[in-house]
Image (cartoon, rainbow, N blue to C red):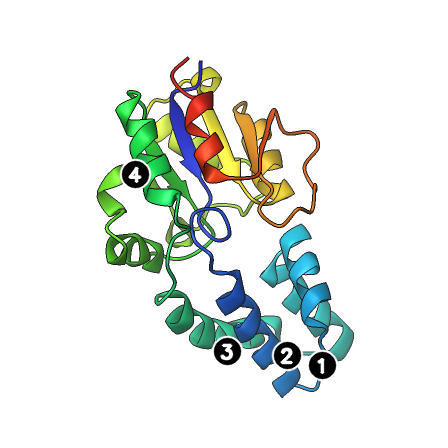
Amino acid sequence: MLTDAIWDLDGTLYDTYPSILSALHETLTKHGVAVDPAALLITTKKTSVHAVIEDCAAQRGWDAAAIFAEYHDVEVQRVLACKPYPEAQATLEAVVAKGGRNFLMTHRDNSAWQLLANSGLRDLFAGGVTSDLHLARKPKPDAVLYILDRWQLPATTAAMIGDRKLDIVAGQAAGVAGIYFDVDGLGDAPMAEYHVDHLHEIPALFGR
């Protein structure tokens, strides 16, 4: 029986990818990189923004950290105006109503908590991890393991929920089930224990 939900943020609870990709597109094109928006979405979903920037930096001799900082300055302001998916609040509330708890596991910094507060979702989370803790990034399991230990969650009743393969890999490496939210229809995580196309499908997996 699943009880506790560990949530990815970007692309899972919030429709932030249009803002993320517009900031990334703007940053890369400013530095002379021709970008195909559709290909950029797939590449970013299957890897990460960090990986895209690091690959471009390696090919062009850039300072990857400086380019990422430039991207982040643009991106964070746009993302703070983003809204959660329409079903997000009801889904989070349903997990709590079934006796479970919601936890956040995001590569975003502590601005993630402000984003949740802006939407009235902050109080639906018992805690979580942001990049400000400087734990290893997904797909490494360090952040999920931290949550399990810090809040004493049994791995057998917890699930990692995300829209990317690396979310599922990180969760499974920590011993928890993976719920793949295939919001973009990429089918990129066949190893996940559960697959959903809509957030409203998730509560049925909990409390049974």
Earlier in the chain: of badge 3 and badge 4, it is 3
Q: Between residues 183 and 158, which one lies in front from this camera angle?
A: 183
Residue 27 in the image: above or below residue 201: below
Pointer 3 residue: 70
Residue 171 in the image: above or below residue 84: above
Residue 15 in the image: above or below residue 68: above
Residue 97 in the image: above or below residue 23: above
Of circles 2 and 3, the one toward us is 2
The kind of residue on which mark 2 rests is Leu
Q: Residues within 10 Å of mark 3 (few under 14, many from 20)?
A: some
Q: Residue at x 47, y 60 (%)?
A: 16
The kind of residue on which mark 3 rests is Glu
Of circles 3 and 1, the one toward us is 1
Q: Residues within 10 Å of mark 2 (few under 14, many from 20)?
A: some
Pointer 2 residue: 28
Earlier in the chain: of badge 4 and badge 1, it is 1
Earlier in the chain: of badge 4 and badge 2, it is 2
The kind of residue on which mark 4 rests is Gly
Q: Quadrant of residue 147?
A: top left
Where residue 33 is drawn, which disc sits there? Answer: 1
Residue 131 in picture, x, y percent from top left: 42, 53
Q: Residue at x 72, y 73 (%)?
A: 36
